[in-house]
Amino acid sequence: MDFAIPDAITRKLAVLDQFIEREIKPLERENLQFFDHRREHARTNWDEDGTPRREWEELLAEMRRRADRAGHLRFALPKALGGEDGSNLAMAVIREHLAHKGLGLHNDLQNESSIVGNFPVVHLLWEYGTAEQKALIEHAITGRQRIAFGLTEPNHGSDATWMETTAVRQGADWVINGAKRFNTGLHTATLDLVFARTSGKPGDARGITAFLVPTDAPGFTAEFMWWTFNMPSDHAEVTLGNVRVPASAILGGEGEGLIVAQHFVHENRIRQAASGVGVAQYCIDESVRYARDRVVFGKPLAVNQAIQWPLAELHTECEMVRNLVYKTAWHLDRQDHLKVSEWVSMANYRGNRLACQAADLAIQVHGGLGYSRHKPFEHIYRHHRRYRITEGSEEIQIRRVAGHLFGMGGKKKRDEG
């Protein structure tokens, strides 16, 4: 068994570090209000339904332009799209490495922005899209067009196969009715990837179809943005009233929408897990550093077992989850993602939980200072806490693992998100 990180990935990390110091850190220093204790306020337009401020998104766009010019942004995309066919293992190592650097413009995961892009929707267009739909890819990469993601509903979250949004055929078109909740990206999106039942009965994995719906279509309404634990918000409550789209709006085939959704969440789940490991290690390292320097009752805080043991246990947990994430990514590079979904679930829920535990412990070790917004731990906790719910809650992930363990994870279950 070879546990060494491939040389090509190690070289990539060094190149990324040089790029960050040369191109990104100076830009970050010019815009510190988005990263210091003012970050949540600076990023959020409270008077515009809590959506991201224009200046914040312009800064992120400039970061992505620089990363694209340097050849980093598209790393994980196919070479035909200007990428490097970056492997899942490479992306796991890179995302962990970037998250381990802490809060910064190089890798601000509050809105999935990074110098090495994730692009789950681009992967969907490339894998399932028609020629017309693939023509959207370049604009989606560069940000000239944004495609939102509408799966969750007011009455249905993890139980996506019970969704109430429907689409029925009328002549050559489809007419969609229903509602979506936490519809991500709606504040700037031109298209929304809407999932609707087109056949079958509630609970059936098949019979759900994915539609690319223009956000300016008659009957499509973003009612309001949900203000969340981590602000700003781009998560809209959406209603669809007799929204008409052509058959060419279908992505991935009629009735095969959950395969599309599963592909989306697997792209995100393993990246989230890797980021969770990286940010957990950052919290551990910062806590160790502080405990060594902080003197209480005439001696360093670090000499106390009450400080040593929780950090030692968390450091051990971090190493175990890191190896699980790497092994899962290695499997994903060699097998269809549906065949290793239980591995992805294990890595995801453990990585997300680890990040929250580490941020919480870092707050405790740093005391009142840790609780303040002058340290990044509260921001880290608020961001990573959502991942224990989104992309399939950790309870759903554990159920998937249990289904595999007890032989109850048949094809129907594997098709469910």
Image: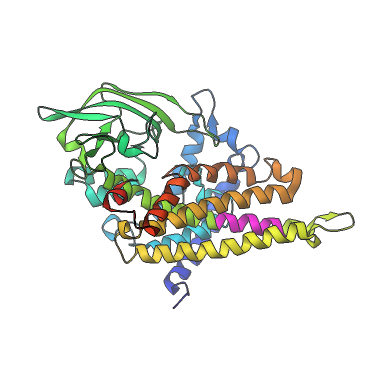
Looking at the rendered structure, the number of numbered marks drawn on it comes to 0
In the displayed structure, 70 sits above or below 194; it is: below
Q: Residue at x 51, y 29 (%)?
A: 227
Picture coordinates of residue 132, whole percent (x, y): 18, 43
Evaluate whether residue 115 shows in this view.
no
Residue drawn 38% across the image and 54% down it? 403
Q: Nearer the viewer, residue 77 or 69?
A: 77
Taking the image as shown, residue 160 lies to the left or right of residue 97, namely left
Image coordinates for residue 289, horizontal then vertical, percent: 72, 59
Q: Is residue 392 magenta?
A: no
Question: Is residue 282 covered in magenta?
Answer: yes
Task: Please state which of residues 387 and 294 is positioned toward the viewer in this rendering.
Answer: 387
Answer above or below: position of 94 versus 62. below
The residue located at (60%, 47%) in the rendering is 29
Residue range of the region highlighted in magenta in the rendering: 278-288
Q: Quadrant of the C terminus?
A: top left
- Which is nearer the eye, 208 or 127? 208
Locate residue 34: give its quadrant: top right
In the displayed structure image, the side of residue 339 where residue 364 appears, left or right: right
- Residue furthest to the left in view is 171
Residue reaching furthest bottom?
Answer: 1
Q: Nearer the viewer, residue 42 or 409?
A: 409
Overall secondary structure of the magenta stretch?
helix
